[in-house]
Amino acid sequence: MSKKNKVPEVDIVVDEQAGVIREVKPEKTRSKKGHERRVNTSIYVILVIMSIIWLAPFVFLVFQSFRSYALESGGMVDYLLPKHWSLDNYRFLFDGSNFFPWCGKALITCGIAAIGQCALLTLAQKKLSNMDSSDKKGRLVWLLCTLAVGLVVFLALAAAVQGMAFAGNVGKICIVVALYLIVGYIMARMFTKQDDRLLRQIPGYVADEDSSPLKKLLSLCLEFLAMDLILLCIVSPMVTSQYLRWYGNTLTIALFVAVLQTIIVLSVSYTLSRLRFKGRKLIMNVVLVLGLFPGFLTMITLYFLLKQLGMTGAGAVPGLILIYVASSGMGYYISKGFFDTIPKSLDESARIDGATRFQVFLKIIMPLAKPIVIYTILMAFMGPWGDYVFASYVAFGNVPNYNVAVGLYQWVNVNDYQGYFTRFCAGGVLVAVPITALFLALQKYYVEGVTGGAVKG
Amino acid sequence: MASVTLEHVKKIYDNKVTAVHDFNLEIKDKEFVVFVGPSGCGKSTTLRMLAGLEDISEGTLKIGDRVVNDVEPKDRDIAMVFQNYALYPHITVYENMAFSLRLRKMDNEEIHRRVCQAAEILGITEYLGRKPKALSGGQRQRVAIGRAIVRDPAVFLMDEPLSNLDAKLRNQMRAEIIMLRKRVDTTFIYVTHDQTEAMTLGDRIVVMKDGYIMQVGSPQEVFDTPKNLFVAGFIGSPQMNFLKAKLVKEGSGYSVELLGVKIPLNADQNAALANNKVGTQEITLGVRPEHTSVLFDGKQNAIECSINVNEMMGSELHLHLSTVNNDSIIVRLPTVDLTQEQRKQLSYGNKMYITFPAKVMHLFDPKTEKNLIYG
């Protein structure tokens, strides 16, 4: 502390009438800084209290999930920390499945396959860049041959490591071959096309960080890994426990809905933002009014409709995907607001440059609307992930087709509350994992997306 | 490279507002045509109809011999430069310029050749690797022009391309557009509200107002023989002076009476007026500021005014005067020949005498606003 601050807090006043000098204690003035600090402190106090209220149940859930159902009472207890920490509940969730060995083998299989496929493609790219660019047919043959070799490597590995049998699996293998060739061709085209040999001649050309050769190769490798894993799930699925089955159902529904709903929402928003047609205002108003009614008012009607289509009970997974995707176009507001902030002259300019409406949407609007795309994907994923109402009645009574929420509730509600509570908690914790990871990874875009509709992003 | 023909083209918006009335124009191959007019006159709408961004309500539009009323913009073989540049912000200048070529599935080498060539013409080679955000306004406008010229389009549309630039840059870019036009020999259609741009750039000027064409002609024609009051007032800076006067017919000759001064017209004007069967009538007399001369000695046949404002522009003086009738007149007076004494006389409130020859006078009918001689 400096000396100046140690001066006693008094003012000296000359009282002329009395002819004396008096010491007067100064009035305490509220400094601006002090005020700010007080406001901040009170905000923090409120936030802490609120977060305790929010977090308490979750903390409780996490602790309970580590309390063994075998050693202690499985039901609700009046203490927070478990007496014996154990992973019994989690073990139960995976009971009867070959989850860990399957995952280990799958990673080995797909990892080796992906590295091999990448190496092949890199060779192909070298070859293609030396080839005459007008020889379209030759290039195509080269690319397809590379992909085919990669596919053979993958299938051989799957047979060797995973013990996949070719006989009796013909249908599935056909699907896998088709999927591999289509997706692989798109990825390979994108990889080989980004040939910036010419661009490097431009003065001042700075390669994007994403396009450094090592990063490109790494992302290609990851792409192939993901694709191989999905394909492996088709040809050589793991043996699941009840919980893993539910988890798989939920994941399938959520992924399909995330993709389909995002496509629909973004197309509807773009249409309403850019095209002018008769009834546009009417549609927007009707959707607004319809949106005021809660979705589950339609429950009974939807159930009968799905029953007609055979999509209840055993067909619950496609049925639920249908339900979630069907009404998704109604959630266009936020992304339309965002599209409205992108200048229209960009569209016009692109259309004069020779782009169709779809190309404008894909090549101009999408890259500019990245935050809102990610926001839409997140929202579309979260809806079905945590849904109980629709999932419970569509899959009514058909246990293997439950989603996680319904299944877990069934444990504590129907089976045996006292015995299953801690296992319910463990199930809940695992449900929270992917959504938390998604949020943490995409937080930046999410915030941009939510506010982006209001102010130019 | 193509001609453009507009026949009875009309634009009616959904709310029944007619933006463009019966637009007829034939633009020749490789011609530079400028649409000029105040804001809201329909010039941009016409251009957007040409580009295919707005539907044509009535009439036919031809590019070359092809009717393109219902052809998508991408199939019209046109390129357009926008006022706000409309560059794609997420890709580099190079990719901005290559965008249209890539959509046409052109060869990588060919794209590279064209982009580099266009960049060289416009002097933006060193910025090719940058994103538009990292460019100044003038550079962005160059990129926008470059994006249009790589396409080698049949018709080149420009929608107020210089309006967003500052005055100095605008002059420079204007000169560059003139040079560009020599190198890229194609049909240009240029929209502006700035009459200087219109005069300096155009082979032909189309003056528009409220959706109607007021006059079509070369810059010199539009300047010398404005067909009506609007064109006369719009073209030229400072604006043409308008005075109430009287046209008197005496025998075969005509003369103008203005504030007690009588100015006989010359033979050509007499003949034209007689041909148009004009009689004695009230007129609006138009005289350009640069055609008016100030008399320092003698006041025969001159109009008396008093000085309101004296604006020193350096090479010339702009004198704002008012006549006895309180009509205001602006006079441009070159400063080179002025003596010190004369300068002293040009101060506020002093009396002045101005005069102008008959050949610079424009006679307009106050009711129809038409030029009585050329209208």
Image (spheres, coloured by chain):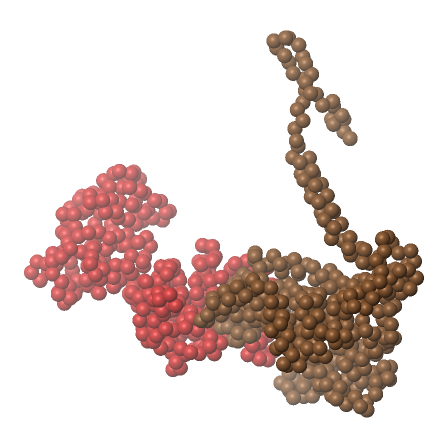
The percent position of residue B165, horizontal first and vertical second, equals 47, 57
The percent position of residue B80, horizontal first and vertical second, equals 47, 69
Residue at 85% across / 56% down in the picture? Answer: A77
Q: How many marks?
A: 0
Name the one closer to the observer, B257 or B214. B214
Classify B237 as above or below B124.
Answer: above
Name the one closer to the observer, B189 or A305. A305
The percent position of residue A34, horizontal first and vertical second, equals 69, 35
Q: Quadrant of residue A89?
A: bottom right
Q: Quadrant of the C terminus of chain B?
A: bottom left
Residue at the farthest bottom position = A167
Q: Which chain is brown?
A: A
Q: Quadrant of residue B178?
A: bottom left
Residue at 80% across / 90% down in the picture? Answer: A168
Classify B106 as above or below A432.
Answer: below
Q: Quadrant of the N terminus of chain B?
A: bottom left
Q: Quadrant of residue A81?
A: bottom right
Q: Is residue A383 left or right of residue B310?
A: right
Classify A325 as above or below A3.
Answer: below
Classify B232 as above or below A192.
Answer: above
Q: For residue A107, say whether it is visible.
A: no
Q: For residue A78, say whether it is visible.
A: yes
The percent position of residue A264, horizontal first and vertical second, equals 59, 72
Identify the colour of chain B in the image: red
Residue at 40% across / 69% down in the picture? Answer: B47
Residue at the farthest left position = B251
Name the one closer to the observer, A283 or A345. A283
Residue at 31% across / 67% down in the picture? Answer: B213
